[in-house]
Amino acid sequence: MADRAAPRISLLGSGGAQFAGQALGLLLALVVSHLIARRMGVGPDADAFLLGRRLITAVTEALNQIVIVVFIPLVAAQAAAGAGIWRIVARSGGGALLTGTALAVIFLVGAPWIVATVAPEFDAPTARLATQVMWILSLALPATVATVALAAYCNVRGTFGAVAAVRQLPRAGVVIALSLGTGGLALAAAGAYTLGAVAVTGIMLLAALRLSRGAPAPRAGPPKRSAAPRNAAAALVMATGAMVVLWLETAIAAGSGPGAVPMLDYAQRLGALLGNTLATALTLVVFADMARRAAAGEGSELARRFNGALWTGFALMLPITAGMIVNAPAIIELVLGYGAFASAAIRDEVAHLTRWMAVAPMAALVVRMMYIRVLADDTLPVVRIAVAATAADVAIRVVLFRILVPVLGLTGIPVGLVLAPVAPALVMAVWLRRRGTFRGGAVPGAAVRPLLAASVAVSVAVVGGALLGPFVQDWIATGPKSAALVGLVASAVAGGVVLLVAVGAFHIRPRLR
């Protein structure tokens, strides 16, 4: 019987599947924001719940970075060497579970002090509720980290969309709790999230076991030195920096007055979530592919894949960014403009913040791509590059926030988020250029120009549709909600029609290998 070969990962195909799975999470996140705005508004309950959630989210995202960076290359190397699924699970999922458990204990004990340090302006009831939210969400950390390790195995095996979709179950639980709850919404939502996280871990274990039955035969050759220790150190540095800056943003918002934390959170979710979802999907697929290629001895392909992925990311992000900027007021009206979030002044402020937040993922995409390029190459001094880039990132954010927030108020935070990625990107670019990492990675113009041309055409159509929306609204809109919906539909239809025409006119390839 012929050996089964490892699956070839298509950038557009697998990236599209990952994005489709995460799109479910995007939809659920919008529903969660809608329900929080409708039932909590920008009052003390929303302050407490969103502060507690953001603090734990910072930890979860940091752990996610560490586990992905460590375990995707580790799992790829183990799978290439023919390791069985239970050995991989024991070495990857077991360690992640222990790490998550230790962190859960730390946050269970330290939550009161953390809340008091980050948000000293909170009154006693609000601080107590935020602490309770942190306690409940901390219980999800072991399961969350184990899930990321198990998902790494599925990603290396070429499965993306289904994995991403299953991991949205905790958000679905939050939607149910906020929809059906009658009291204590913050604690009920936190509990639903934790239960969903535990359920996802069980589902991911079953999925990994099923995929292991069709594992390809191991490749011949001497085993490669594991990059896990150096990747773990680099990821720990990067994740710590990411957690610090997210806590810094939250602390600045908490000190900006009542309701500032919810307004920042709403704007970040609505403005940056779609772009960040796409960026996360693309970088995850690229990193899994690079790790697999490095494990298989195909290091010469890394530079070309990096450049191709970067251009693809720009092309995909441009229409999303343009659409979010021009449609921000309509999105705010449809998603948040209900119940306890009825104030027009608050909505205008959130719309302004949302426009700035929409630009941030474009800059962040460059930094993410450069990080995974560094981590996928075991010839680079990964830890030193990570330390230099992270230090530059944290330093410039502190400086920007200190300069911009006193002048612009809460808007200074998203403006800082847009500008800050320049520093770490420059640090890594200079370092990589000196090492000659970019050599041999040129992408043929014939492969890039059609995609960029289509991207620009769709962006112009999306903006044009939004600008034409008011003329259509005069004919069929009957109120602010219907007017907002008409504007969004006009923008989406214009972009969709031009996209269909551009795909044929520019002969865009559906699969980029």
Image: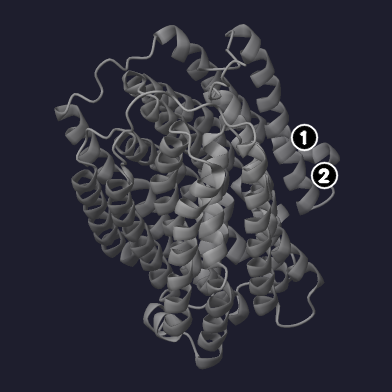
Horizontal and vertical percent position of residue 136: 59, 77
Circle number at residue 477: 2
The image quadrant that residue 305 belongs to is: top left
In the foreground, 333 or 147:
147
Which of disc 1 and disc 2 is earlier in sequence? Answer: 1
In the foreground, 492 or 200:
200
Q: Is residue 52 visible?
A: yes
In the depicted structure, whether residue 107 falls above or below residue 250: below
User: Please, what secondary structure does the residue beneath circle 1 have?
Assistant: helix
In the picture of the structure, the residue carrying the numbered disc 1 is 472
- Going by the picture, which residue comes out furthest to the front? 1
In the foreground, 283 or 409:
283
**Alpha-carbon span between mark 2 and mark 1:** 8 Å
Q: Is residue 330 visible?
A: no
The residue positioned 77% from the left and 52% from the top of the image is: 481
The image quadrant that residue 444 belongs to is: top left
Quadrant (top left, top right, bottom left, bottom right) of the N terminus: top right
User: Please, what secondary structure does the residue beneath circle 2 have?
Assistant: loop
**Disc 2 residue type?**
Ala
In the depicted structure, whether residue 179 falls above or below residue 290: below
Left or right: 285 as drawn, with respect to 191: left
